């Protein structure tokens, strides 16, 4: 067992990472006579910290320790540790803001900078993600946000000033402010280093570079740091995590001791071998041979002619499970939107569902809602240029913003601009005929006009060809929700009111098959795992182009596969010439046709 100094444990799926960490703590306490109070274990989530602490306290050896909680080993998230660092030194009173509140703040800042036409919850969330990248020392993503790079920096400054003036903070602020405090205050830094003599870090592959700098500061000169992770399960690139952090550790601590946990005690041999074949194609990884701790493991693959046949086969396979097997199984999807659709599919067919991860989003908060809001404001409350810009080319009418000569949109001016183009003039006449009609209708009726007569519904269906049911559901819910608008209520007041409502949720059963995303599945395990929609464009996502992003998508699939203990069911459709994900194309597996 490792004693003093840095150690890096490369631990594959199902290899007993939590067990290893707990054994390490007991070894330090009973074999090295280290005070439990000077041992800190950092985990990625509150749930993981709670589970690890529970397992530690449940061990009979912990009963030998002093009963008072002040003299036991500490477990917590890195954000929780940072809050303690700041509160103890500064009497920190800043309140953490929710994601929805930060989105509303960013929407207001966009308006203040004159970007009303781009003001939507979806766009604000993308900007906040970019700001998080910058805060964590990651370069700009290079994504074109449609605003000048200088304006992006100004929005970052606005956001920081807004939060500071009101005593608000986000998770990135906790890390950065703690890091700066410890870097600048040597005495306070040494106080914490003396307090934490032995530092253990779980899920180390999920740590970003800013968090890593903080962890190194806490470890101090004694370097009693013990990290456990798996670069093959690094799936949080959007938060700044990089699989290379495992290699970086060995560069920073060349005297490290390296340990490998390569026996997978969770999955059957066939599943372990199949998962290894998937992930070993990645170039940026630590080479390791994962061995199965048990024989068996059943894998079934199905190529379905249509999406409907794929769903029917999935339902048949789930129905073949007995009650106990059903409750120990999961359907795992690439995105939250897919997870919602499959939850509804199962519920519709009377299969009990247990949902993990995000709840369904309030439809009045999404990009589609913002398009409809702009449309209604234009028709009902004055023909503002910023509102018109948002929907004028949805579907594409080839209208140029140069045709909008003033802040108030004029049909006559646009027709004059295109007077030499009869086809364009006809498009403009059709558009404004619909707008004049919508002006006289109720909110709900106007939404129907926008969908059907003005072609917005077909525009969305062509934009999201693989999610017709989800798109129609959002449009239907928005149209129906608009019936709740009161006479004389402004569009903004109505939408703000609806956004504050919690989405209605059907009563959920305590037991059922679990439906969740690949990200949410990390750290969990199930008797049987069902992976539908294994099509190119879904996994990897069609937007992914760079090699490092493709490798993360492959790791994401690897995580999903390695959740299965006994059975793994794989599905994809060949409908409309769709193809199997490239990650499985060259792996030997018979694909059956149902």
Image: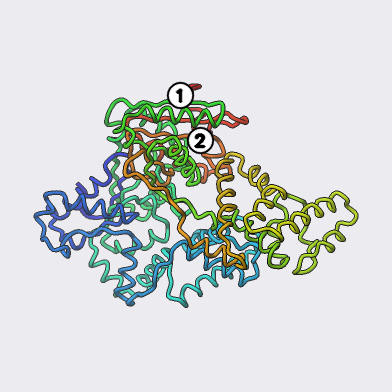
Q: Is residue 272 visible?
A: yes
Q: Is residue 291 visible?
A: no
User: Which residue corresponds to mark 2?
Assistant: 533
Lateral position of residue 384 relative to residue 157, left or right:
right
Residue 48: image location, x then y, percent: 30, 52
Q: Tell me which corner region of the image, top left, top right, bottom left or bottom right, holds residue 209.
A: bottom left
Task: Name which residue lies at 34% across and 55% down.
Answer: 45
Task: Name which residue lies at 80% across and 51% down.
Answer: 427
Lateral position of residue 504 relative to residue 574, left or right:
left
User: Which residue corresponds to mark 1?
Assistant: 589
Q: Which mark is residue 301?
A: none
Callout 1: few (<14), some (14-19), or many (20+) C-alpha neighbours within 10 Å? few
Lateral position of residue 115 relative to residue 191, left or right:
right
Task: Name which residue lies at 61% across and 63% down.
Answer: 119
SS at circle 2: loop
Which mark lies nearer to you, 2 or 1? 2
Q: Tell me which corner region of the image, top left, top right, bottom left or bottom right, holds residue 90.
A: bottom left
Foreground of the two, 109 or 194: 109
Q: Residue furthest right?
A: 420
Task: Name which residue lies at 59% across and 60% down.
Answer: 120
Q: In this picture, is 218 found above or below 90?
A: above
- Sequence-first disc among 2 and 1: 2
Foreground of the two, 272 or 169: 169
Foreground of the two, 158 or 197: 158
Residue 225: image location, x then y, percent: 28, 56
């Amino acid at each position: 067992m490792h004693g003093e100094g840095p150690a890096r444990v490369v631990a594959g799926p199902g290899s007993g990472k939590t067990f290893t960490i707990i054994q390490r703590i007991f070894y330090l306490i009973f074999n090295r006579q280290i005070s439990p109070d000077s041992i800190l274990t950092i985990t990625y989530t509150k749930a993981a910290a709670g589970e690890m602490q529970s397992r530690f306290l449940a061990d009979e050896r912990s009963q030998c320790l002093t009963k008072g909680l002040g003299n036991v080993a500490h477990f917590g998230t890195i954000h929780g540790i940072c809050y303690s660092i700041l509160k103890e030194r500064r009497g920190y009173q800043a309140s953490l803001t929710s994601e929805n509140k930060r989105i509303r703040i960013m929407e207001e800042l966009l308006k203040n900078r004159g970007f009303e036409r781009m003001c939507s919850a979806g766009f604000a969330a993308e900007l906040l993600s970019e700001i998080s990248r910058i805060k964590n020392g990651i370069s700009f993503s290079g994504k074109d946000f449609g605003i000048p790079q200088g304006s992006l920096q100004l929005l970052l400054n606005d956001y920081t000033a807004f939060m500071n003036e009101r005593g608000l903070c986000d998770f990135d602020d906790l890390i950065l402010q703690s890091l700066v405090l410890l870097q600048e205050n040597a005495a306070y830094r040494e106080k914490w280093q003396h307090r934490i003599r032995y530092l253990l870090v779980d899920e180390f592959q999920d740590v970003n570079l800013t968090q890593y700098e903080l962890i190194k500061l806490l470890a101090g000169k004694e370097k009693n740091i013990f990290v456990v992770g798996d670069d093959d399960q690094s799936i949080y690139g959007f938060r700044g995590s990089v699989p290379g952090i495992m290699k970086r550790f060995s560069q920073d601590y060349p005297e490290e001791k390296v340990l490998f946990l390569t026996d997978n005690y969770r999955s059957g041999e066939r599943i372990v071998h199949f998962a290894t074949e998937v992930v070993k194609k990645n170039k940026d990884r630590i080479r390791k041979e994962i061995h199965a701790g048990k024989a068996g493991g059943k894998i079934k693959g199905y190529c379905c002619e249509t999406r409907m046949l794929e769903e029917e086969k999935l339902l048949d396979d789930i129905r073949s499970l007995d009650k106990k097997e059903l409750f120990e199984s999961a359907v795992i999807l690439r995105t939250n939107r897919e997870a919602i659709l499959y939850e509804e599919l199962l519920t519709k067919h009377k299969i009990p569902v247990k949902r993990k991860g995000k709840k369904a989003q309030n439809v009045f908060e999404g990009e589609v809602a913002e398009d409809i809001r702009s449309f209604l404001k234009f028709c009902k409350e004055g023909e503002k240029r910023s509102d018109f810009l948002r929907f004028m080319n949805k579907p594409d009418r080839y209208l140029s913003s140069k045709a909008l000569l003033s802040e108030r949109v004029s049909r006559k001016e646009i027709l004059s601009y295109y007077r030499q183009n009869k086809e364009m003039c006809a498009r403009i006449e059709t558009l404004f005929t619909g707008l004049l009609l919508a002006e006289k209708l109720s909110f709900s009726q106007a939404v129907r006009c926008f969908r059907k007569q003005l072609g917005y519904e077909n525009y969305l269906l062509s934009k999201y060809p693989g999610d017709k049911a989800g798109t129609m559901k959002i449009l239907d819910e928005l149209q129906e929700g608009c019936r709740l608008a009161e006479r004389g209520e402004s569009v903004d007041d109505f939408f703000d009111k609806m956004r504050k409502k919690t989405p209605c949720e059907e009563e959920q059963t305590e037991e059922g098959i679990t439906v969740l995303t690949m990200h949410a599945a990390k750290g969990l395990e199930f008797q049987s795992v069902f992976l539908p929609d294994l099509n190119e464009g879904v996994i990897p996502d069609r937007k992914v182009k760079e090699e490092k992003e493709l490798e993360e998508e492959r790791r994401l699939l690897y995580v999903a596969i390695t959740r299965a203990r006994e059975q793994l069911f794989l599905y994809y459709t060949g409908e409309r010439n769709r193809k199997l994900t490239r990650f499985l194309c060259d792996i030997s597996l018979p694909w059956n046709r149902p």
